[in-house]
Amino acid sequence: MASKKILCPYCFEEFENTQAWYQCESEERDNDGDFRCKRVTSDEYDKYWKGKDLLMRNVWQQKSGFFARLSGPKLNAQKCPQCGYNSRRFVCPHCFNWLPTEMIENGAEIISVIGSPSSGKTNYIVALIHQLRKYGYKMNLQVIPTQLYRDGHKEESTQNLFKRMESQLFTEKTVLQKTSKKTNDIPWIFHLSQPTTGKSIYLVFYDTAGEKFTDDIKNNTKYLKESSAVILILDTLSINYIKEILTKKGLQDLGGASADYKEIQTALNMFRGQSGVKIENKPFAFVFSKFDAVIDHKNDLDFAADEFVIGDKKSDSSYIKTGILNLSKIDSISESIEEALFEQWDMGALASYANNWSAKRGMRDPNNPANKYKFFGVSAFGTMPDENGELEKVEPYRVMDPLVWILHKLGQFDIPTKK
């Protein structure tokens, strides 16, 4: 097996898979109820989790000779030097957080998902994964929530969190609650693969409190810098123009919490300056959530919604039926939102910022195929909830568009397209 680069989704340090450490899998206990393989501590683990003497399973470096390093790791089970238990569990050598075996075997490219205050990013990621599991087969895509968790905290795994929240949203039809500021920033990690090409990528999502968005950008420059692409969720109902008109119509409950888009833009500009890479080479999806409110009130908002509706009904992504991505449709949707940002919504600064991902920086040429940015309008629910956060029905709208477009732009996956 050839050596491959790994990008840790926790600390975002890069390393060769020959450098991954093993970790003991033993759960055996003695007569006193203590673990037979004693838990250990690590300064690196403490530093990442901002704790002191945090207990974790025993770890050790791979045992490999000179020729093994040349040919790459075998990744066979190895005996724990502390207790002798055979283990095939791997951790990052920098922060000692557990990583899936398939990530160590196959390498890891990452798409990061971030969100502005009140953008409903948790609802979005749950709806996105739900739709991928339901319709991904149309494009031969499979997605699996990984079982990632801190040692001794299995309830925090992506798989368990997703299962619980998917049930709340799609079975109980209840909006997911706003993320608490006290919640630990543990990444949700989803393995997205395409069996026909053997290609895979990881979606990484930090379910952090929205108010921490600017701090997230400041503190996680590396997180975005090392990602292959970025999906940024923005709150449509925080746009002053939209919020004011809907409020005048007596729809105050629709108005999202105030989001300082200038502050968001400042944070992103800072990221551009500090990243040290030409991030316009990375696909960047600017995704406006809760877009059903705009479509349903298109006349009041003076929004040209022709790309979103057929007659009086919203038109969902055509590839859900055909398995073919219509690039012209993606271009037209992006252009309609970009025009609204400049012309109606007084958001020209954000649109100009996005233009920095264009083939010619600062030039408005939305349909240039060399562009690395697009605007999207999506809805995790398909309709607005009532005042109690209850939903009559849940019909996600175009939530897969940003990801499918990004996979096409990355060029690794076989995404059938038409112009």
Image (cartoon, rainbow, N blue to C red):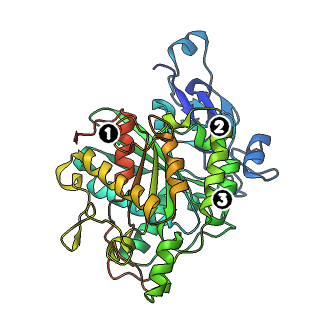
C-alpha span from label 1 to label 2: 30 Å
Secondary element at tag 1: strand
**Mark positioned earlier in the residue sequence (1 or 3):** 1
Q: Does dot 3 land on a helix, a strand or a loop?
A: helix
Mark 3 lies on residue: 263
Kind of residue at badge 1: Gln
Q: Nearer the viewer, residue 234 or 143?
A: 234
Residue ID for mark 2: 275
What amino acid type should be assigned to the residue bearing mark 2? Ser
Residue name at image x 55 percent, y 14 percent:
68
The mark lying in front, picked from 3 and 2, is 3
CA distance for labels 1 and 3: 38 Å
> Amino acid type of disc 3?
Glu
Q: Is there a contact, CB below 8 Å, between mark 3 and mark 2?
A: no
Of the two numbered discs 1 and 3 in the rendering, the one whose residue sits closer to the viewer: 3
For label 1, the residue is 194
For residue 158, above or below residue 201: below
